[in-house]
Amino acid sequence: MKTVGILGGMGPLATSDLFNKIVTLTDAKNDNDHIHIILNNYPIIPDRTKYILGDGENPIKYMIEAALKLEVMGANVVIMPCNTAHYFYDEITEYLTIPFINMIEETAKEIKKVNPESKKVWLLSTQGTYKTKIYDNIFKNYDIEISRPGKAVEDVITDIIYSIKKGDTALKNIDKNLLTSYLNSIEGESIILGCTELPVAFNILGIAKGCIDPTKILAKSAIHFAGKRTLED
């Protein structure tokens, strides 16, 4: 069985969510059936969105350092529970001799697998992810168009993301009504929770049903890479 290395800390709760999903989705009968996971929770990595928007330190050297530590410790593959950080994916892979599963690419593959006719999805993400067009650039290879909500909804999404990052899991100051109204307006269409804090937050808010969760997709890809089956196979 192969060892999975998690390049985490962006943020810690999202990292914990990925770890939990790998464990709970693995088809295992006892402790020994589970996957060997090396988790590098490295929260010192500077904010990716702030850097992309021109207001922060470049995080690339920290991510390369974290990835190399995983490889040195024996990881056979690297996975990274941060959508925005995939803007730096190519730079990180240049330093690795082991595979690095791309969460965004895995999400595109899964969407096409579930619905080969899919042509458009709505993306909820950080401003950094929107600006860099990392979803657009990969999804165009799968003939899928990325759509984004209006500014009011984007502002709520940003508030949610940074609330989770600072440990505010009550989300009391979030305008849930605006968000729920938006989700109802596009009911029946595909919605990607394109920031790893969002699956956590949407579960807390009770509005995760029907949304596409890249964290879960990445967890299943990691399980398969390690040589195990998932409970959904």
Image: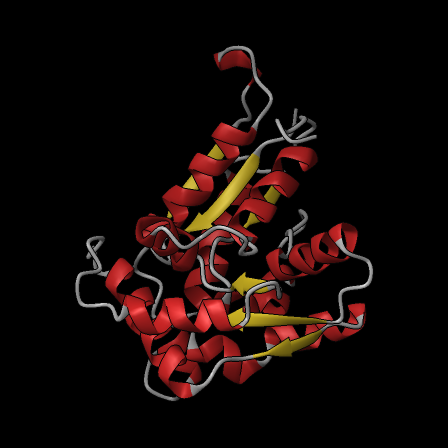
Q: Position of residue 82 (x, y in %)?
A: 47, 59
Q: At 54% from the left edge and 45% from the top edge, which residue is drawn?
A: 216
Q: In the image, what residue occupies the spot 54% across and 80% down? A: 148
The relative height of residue 18 versus residue 94 in the rendered view (above or below) is above
Q: Is residue 125 visible?
A: no
Q: Quadrant of the N terminus?
A: top right
List x then y, in percent, for residue 230.
63, 29
- On the image, the x and y values in percent for residue 90 come to 64, 68
Q: Give the residue displayed 40% in from the left and 55% down from the top.
A: 207
Count of numbered badges drawn on the protein: 0
Q: Is residue 102 above or below residue 36?
A: below
- Which quadrant would residue 155 be assigned to in this image? bottom left
Left or right: residue 113 compared with residue 185: right
Q: Is residue 167 above or below residue 230?
A: below
Query: Would you say residue 89 is visible in this rendering?
Result: yes
**Where does the image place residue 158, in percent across and percent down from the top left?**
34, 74
Q: How is the image coloured?
A: secondary structure
Residue drawn at 45 percent across, 85 percent down: 150
Left or right of 50 on screen, residue 125? right
Q: Quadrant of the C terminus?
A: top right
Which of 101 and 147 lies nearest the eye of the viewer?
147
Q: Is residue 140 left or right of residue 175?
A: right
